[in-house]
Amino acid sequence: MRALDDRLPWYRTMPPSRRSAVGLVAQSGITSFIAWHEDPEAQPWIAADVFAAAPRELLRSVSLQQTLQLIRTVVSVFEDRIGGADASMREPILLYSREIAFAAADVYARAAESRGLWDARLEALVVDSILTGEHDDELPSRSAALGWHGRGECAVLVGIAPRQLDVDIIRRRARHVGCDVLVGVQGTRLVVVIGRAASDEEAAGGEPIDFLTIADALAEGFAEGQLVLGPPVPSIVDAAQSAKAALAGFAVADAWRRTPRPVRADDLLPERALAGDPLARRALIRTVYEPLRDHSSDLLATLACYLDTGRSLEATARELFVHPNTVRYRLKRISEIIGWDATGAREALALHTAIILGAIHESSRERAQRSGRAAEPRPPQPSRPGRGRGEGRADGHAGRGRDAVAG
């Protein structure tokens, strides 16, 4: 015990209860060595029983490296105090210390295997809860138990799972680009939740790595086929939003003839909207239709006319009775407001889809407002006072008034 105090600095800082547990293990090892030396054939597995006296708490608090340092210290004391006095004891000490080392490795190997299976089940549970959106307040703590250090934005990457999945490739690539990942397999789909391991200020070079660059680095772990990246969300608690967008984009990615790999889910908004994705429809209306409608009706009318005429400046100018330079100026203003360029074929498809969806939304809202006004109950009309003394009173005496008039 004095040798442990002198040679191992981390042992001196341990709580008394754990130091006592280490002492029990060392004492058990000495006792087992004496019993084994007296009759080596009687108890061939006695070395494995040395660690049976150790509480499970000690296994969690003492690493394998520290355990090997403990064994080395105890064996060196054996060699100095016993082997130095009797040279014939050196070989039994070496044989027994080898058995002790293998027994320690076996204990930690079984613990690691058990922890690995538990981590795999927990990781599958976390990924499944993110995909379904049915998670609770325990999601951050469960992800932290899996080694998730993500602070800040995260995104979900969806692709095709290979026949022989090697998760280590994905994790190794993720560590190389400085991010955390959670990996799950859903049927033929491979889902990877990506999180930034460092904040923007702590990122190398001051600029965080773009999620599309991270997805390109992780593409090697996926099978050939479409690879869709969901939009970034503030934290892992909001990862279900990114997962929904990624899954919706993955379902329609084949509809785009030249789909890049990987591709952002927001680049597939037209296909997603046509497939009935409500998130894509709301995104197109919110990011394209409503800003143009609220800014200027001329811009919205110009964009609709420009797309209806096959993106022809002259035809648009003739229909709107303006100069072609006016159309060019308005298209430039549209690009500045919404960030989409109507002169490109791909973006023109998204803009045209957004205008159609916005018009349908406005029309349905107006019909709902008209039907709501028609269904409103009319306020009660006040009774008009009669000329007779007892005619038409609304206080329950109408009958008496009619009797009086009849008389």
Image: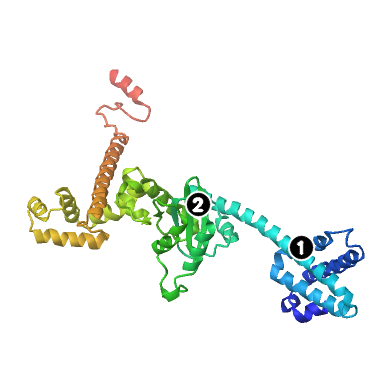
State the residue in front, 324 or 177: 177
| Left or right: residue 28 compared with residue 147 | right
Query: Which quarter of the figure has residue 145?
Result: bottom right
Quickly name the residue at label 2: 130
Quickly name the residue at label 1: 103
Mark 2 or 1: in front is 1
Query: Residue 293, can we see it?
Result: no
Residue 126 position within the rendered picture, expressed as x and y whole percent measured from the top left? 55, 53
- In the rendered structure, which amino acid carries the disc numbered 2? Ile
Q: How many marks?
A: 2
The local secondary structure at tag 1 comes to helix
Query: Residue 189, can we see it?
Result: yes
Q: Are marks 2 and 1 in contact (CB under 8 Å)?
A: no
Query: Which quarter of the figure has residue 109?
Result: bottom right
Q: Residue at x 42, y 69 (%)?
A: 208
Q: Residue at x 32, y 24 (%)?
A: 401
Q: Residue at x 90, y 78 (%)?
A: 86
Residue 171 position within the rendered picture, expressed as x and y whole percent measured from the top left? 52, 61
Disc 2: CA contacts within 10 A as few (<14), some (14-19) or many (>=20)? many
Residue 242 position within the rendered picture, expressed as x and y whole percent measured from the top left? 43, 54
Query: Which tag, 2 or 1, sits closer to the chain's start?
Result: 1
Q: Residue at x 76, y 67 (%)?
A: 101
- In the rendered structure, which amino acid carries the disc numbered 1? Ala
Decide: is 9 above or below 51. Answer: below
Disc 1: CA contacts within 10 A as few (<14), some (14-19) or many (>=20)? some
State the residue in front, 191 or 72: 72
User: Looking at the figure, which quarter contains the N terminus?
Assistant: bottom right
C-alpha span from label 2 to label 1: 40 Å
Q: How is the image coloured?
A: rainbow
| Left or right: residue 315 compared with residue 296 | left
